[in-house]
Image (tube, grey):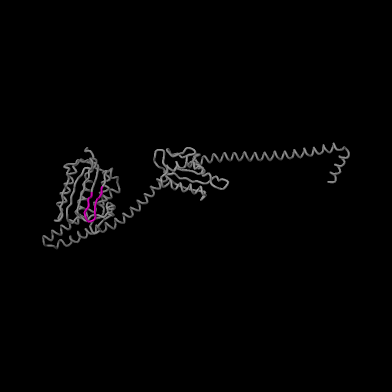
C-alpha cells in the first residue's frame, strides 16, 4: 500500500494534475470493461436458461397435447365472475358430443343435463365460488347433439384467484365414459342375475322337493297296498288317486322343462307358428276341463260374441296358457262359476280371459303372481312355475298376461296377443 501511495505522489508531483486525470480515467475504463464483461456473461447465462425454458415449455406442451389425445380428454375453463364456459381443447373421439361455443352461459349448459345431475352441478359450482374446496370430481348425463344422453366424467380445480383470495377461474377435464357405464351396468346385471339364480336355485330345491314328494308318496303308498285290496270300488278309488297324483307329478316336471327352455333359449326364435281358430281352441279347452270337473257346486261356460278368430301364431303356447288359466281357476274356486271368453281389442290385439268366483288375490300378491316359485296359497299343491311360464310364452308371442282380482270376490286372468294376419 505504501508503494502505491509513493508512486501516486511521485506521479502527481512530477507531471502534475494531467497525469492524475489520465490515470484515473484508465482505472475507470478498466472497471467499466470488467463490469460490462460480467453483465454480458450474466445476460448470456440468462438467455441460455430462457431458451432452455422455452424449449422445455414447447416439449411439455407437445407432451400435454399427446396425453390429452391419448386419454381422449377435453379441457375446459369456467369464468366464475360471469359463469361462462369455454372448451379450450377437445380430443373426445365420439360423434355428437356436446361442445359449447366459447363463453356459453352455464345456465344454458345446465339445461342439457339430467335434472338430478344438474342439481349436483349447481352444488359443485356453489362450493367452488365460496371456496368450500378446490378440487372436484363429478359424473353426469348430458344431452348429445342427436337428443340422447351420454355419461361425462369431469375433474376440476381452482386455477386463479383475485386479490382477496376469491376463486375467479375454474378449470378441468371432461371425458366421455358411456362405454365404462355400460360395462358397469353389464357387471351389475350379471351380479344381480347370479344372485337371482342363487335365490331361484334355493327356492327350486325347497319347492320341488316338497311338491314332488307329496304326489310321489301317494303313488308309492297306494301302489303298495293296491294288491291287497279286493273290493272293486275301493280298488278303483285307489287307482284314481294314483292316476291323479301321477298327472300332478308329470305336470310338475313339464313345468320344470318349460321354465328350463325359457331360461336357456331365445323364445321368440323358437316359435312354431301356424294358422288356427282361437275360438275353437278355447272351446275345446273349456270342454275338456268341464269333463274333468267333479264339483257339483261349480259351473263352467264359454261366453264370447266372436264366432271365429283366425290367428297365425304358436298354437301350443296359446294352448298352454289357456289350459293353465282354466286349471288354476278350478283349483282355487270351490263354488260358483268359471267363465272363459274372447274379446277383440280395437282390431289390433285379441284377448282371451278366464274369470272365476274363487278366493281372489290381494293387490300385493298380484304384483308377484307371475314370478317363478311364488304361491299365494302354499297349502295348494303346485310348484309355482306355471304362471311364470305363461308370462314368458306371452312375451315371446309379442303380447302379455295379467290379472284383475279382488280378495274374496274372484279373479280374471287374461292373455293379450297381436291379431296377426293369417299367412
Horizontal relation, residue 355 to residue 73: left or right? left
Is residue 409 rendered magenta in the image? yes
Q: Residue 33: where, in percent of width, then height?
A: 75, 38
Q: Residue 351: where, in percent of width, then height?
A: 22, 45
Q: Is residue 216 above or below residue 323?
A: below
Locate the C terminus and report the quarter of the image it occupies.
Answer: top left
Q: Is residue 373 visible?
A: no
Residue at left offset 46%, top offset 47%: 122
Horizontal relation, residue 114 to residue 24: left or right? left
The magenta-colored residue range is 401-413
Residue at left offset 41%, top offset 40%: 144
Frontmost residue, 157 versus 261: 157
Could you say which quadrant of the image residue 310 lies in?
A: top left
Residue at left offset 23%, top offset 41%: 346
Frontmost residue, 302 versus 206: 302
Is residue 206 rendered magenta in the image? no
Amino acid at each position: 500500500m505504501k508503494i502505491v501511495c509513493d508512486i501516486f505522489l511521485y506521479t502527481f508531483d512530477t507531471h502534475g494534475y494531467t497525469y492524475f486525470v489520465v490515470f484515473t480515467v484508465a482505472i475507470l475504463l478498466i472497471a467499466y470493461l470488467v463490469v460490462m464483461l460480467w453483465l454480458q456473461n450474466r445476460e448470456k447465462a440468462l438467455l441460455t436458461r430462457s431458451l432452455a425454458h422455452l424449449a422445455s415449455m414447447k416439449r411439455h406442451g407437445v407432451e400435454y397435447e399427446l396425453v390429452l389425445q391419448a386419454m381422449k380428454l377435453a379441457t375446459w375453463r369456467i369464468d366464475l365472475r360471469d359463469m361462462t364456459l369455454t372448451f379450450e381443447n377437445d380430443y373426445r373421439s365420439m360423434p355428437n358430443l356436446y361442445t359449447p361455443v366459447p363463453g356459453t352461459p352455464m345456465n344454458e349448459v345446465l339445461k342439457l343435463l339430467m335434472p338430478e345431475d344438474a342439481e349436483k352441478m349447481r352444488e359443485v359450482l356453489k362450493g367452488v365460488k365460496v371456496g368450500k374446496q378446490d378440487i372436484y370430481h363429478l359424473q353426469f348425463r348430458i344431452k348429445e347433439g342427436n337428443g340422447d344422453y351420454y355419461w361425462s366424467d369431469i375433474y376440476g380445480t381452482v386455477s386463479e384467484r383475485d386479490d382477496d383470495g376469491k376463486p375467479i377461474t375454474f378449470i378441468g377435464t371432461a371425458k366421455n365414459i358411456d362405454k365404462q357405464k355400460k360395462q358397469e351396468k353389464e357387471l351389475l346385471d350379471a351380479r344381480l342375475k347370479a344372485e337371482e339364480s342363487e335365490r331361484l336355485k334355493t327356492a327350486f330345491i325347497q319347492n320341488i322337493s316338497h311338491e314332488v314328494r307329496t304326489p310321489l308318496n301317494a303313488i308309492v303308498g297306494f301302489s303298495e297296498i293296491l294288491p291287497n285290496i279286493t273290493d272293486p270300488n275301493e280298488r278303483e278309488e285307489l287307482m284314481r288317486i294314483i292316476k291323479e297324483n301321477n298327472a300332478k307329478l308329470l305336470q310338475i316336471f313339464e313345468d320344470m322343462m318349460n321354465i328350463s327352455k325359457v331360461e336357456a333359449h331365445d323364445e321368440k326364435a323358437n316359435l312354431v307358428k301356424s294358422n288356427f281358430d282361437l275360438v275353437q281352441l278355447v272351446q275345446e279347452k273349456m270342454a275338456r276341463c268341464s269333463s274333468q270337473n267333479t264339483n257339483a257346486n261349480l259351473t263352467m261356460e264359454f261366453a264370447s260374441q266372436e264366432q271365429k278368430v283366425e290367428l297365425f301364431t304358436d298354437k301350443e303356447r296359446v294352448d298352454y296358457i289357456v289350459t293353465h288359466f282354466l286349471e288354476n281357476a278350478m283349483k282355487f274356486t270351490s263354488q260358483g262359476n268359471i267363465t272363459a271368453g274372447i274379446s277383440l281389442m280395437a282390431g289390433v290385439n285379441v284377448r282371451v280371459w278366464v274369470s272365476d268366483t274363487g278366493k281372489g288375490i290381494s293387490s300385493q300378491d298380484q304384483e308377484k303372481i307371475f314370478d317363478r316359485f311364488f304361491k299365494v296359497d302354499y297349502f295348494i299343491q303346485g310348484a309355482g312355475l306355471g304362471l311364470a311360464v305363461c308370462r314368458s310364452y306371452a312375451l315371446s308371442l309379442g303380447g302379455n298376461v295379467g290379472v284383475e282380482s279382488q280378495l274374496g270376490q274372484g279373479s280374471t286372468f287374461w292373455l293379450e296377443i297381436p291379431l296377426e294376419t293369417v299367412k
